[in-house]
Amino acid sequence: MSTVLIVEDTLTEAEIITSTLKGAGFTTVVAKSSEDAKTMLAQQKPDLIVMDVVLPGESGFELCRELKEKPETKDIPIVMCSTKSGEMDKFWGMKQGASSYLTKPIDPAELVRTVKLLAKG
């Protein structure tokens, strides 16, 4: 089954996303910051990344752009999740290389549908 890396610094949000994806049969790993995510990515490549935009240190937009520039991570689909729901935010997320942009609060059915569509595993 597919492994999803969740990059989310808010514990409640991380738990909601984790339980939703586990319920749909995905294996999940959680990183609380961009730095944590980079450390985990150096050890294991997930099939997909679900990432918040607002993170401590480097933003989700910056991390997404960085991952899309590296040959070893450029093919991993990234789903941005944020309370930033303006059209400009969505446009900017997609411009950084995100495969999809979901707004919070997360709609569990939409999250599962999006992850299933994008995950290769």
Image (cartoon, rainbow, N blue to C red):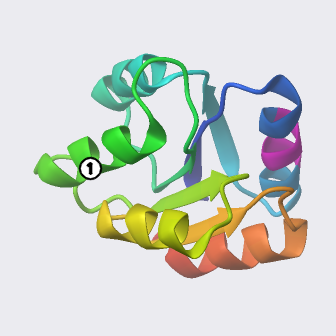
Residue 2 falls in image quadrant: bottom right
Residue at 56 percent across and 75 percent down: it is: 87
Q: Main secondary structure of the magenta part?
A: helix
Q: Nearer the viewer, residue 5 or 14?
A: 14
The magenta region covers 15-19
Q: Nearer the viewer, residue 36 or 29?
A: 36
The quadrant of the image that shows the N terminus is bottom right
Q: Position of residue 19 (x, y in %)?
A: 88, 45
Total marks drawn? 1
Q: Is residue 85 left or right of residue 62?
A: right
On the question of residue 102 being in view, the answer is yes
**Badge 1: few (under 14), some or many (20 or more) residues near its Cα, within 10 Å?**
some
Q: Is residue 96 left or right of residue 50?
A: left
Q: Position of residue 46 (x, y in %)?
A: 45, 46
Q: Nearer the viewer, residue 94 or 46?
A: 94
Q: Position of residue 101 (x, y in %)?
A: 57, 68
On the question of residue 119 being in view, the answer is no
Q: Amino acid at mark 1?
A: Arg
Q: Position of residue 24 (x, y in %)?
A: 82, 63
Q: Is residue 80 magenta?
A: no
Residue at 61 percent across and 21 percent down: it is: 32
Residue at 35 percent across and 25 percent down: it is: 38
Residue 115 falls in image quadrant: bottom right
Q: Nearer the viewer, residue 58 or 20?
A: 58
Above or below residue 68? Residue 75 is: below
- Mark 1 lies on a secondary structure that is helix
Residue at 55 percent across and 28 percent down: it is: 55
Residue that badge 1 annotates: 65
Residue 81 falls in image quadrant: bottom right
Q: Is residue 76 left or right of residue 84?
A: left
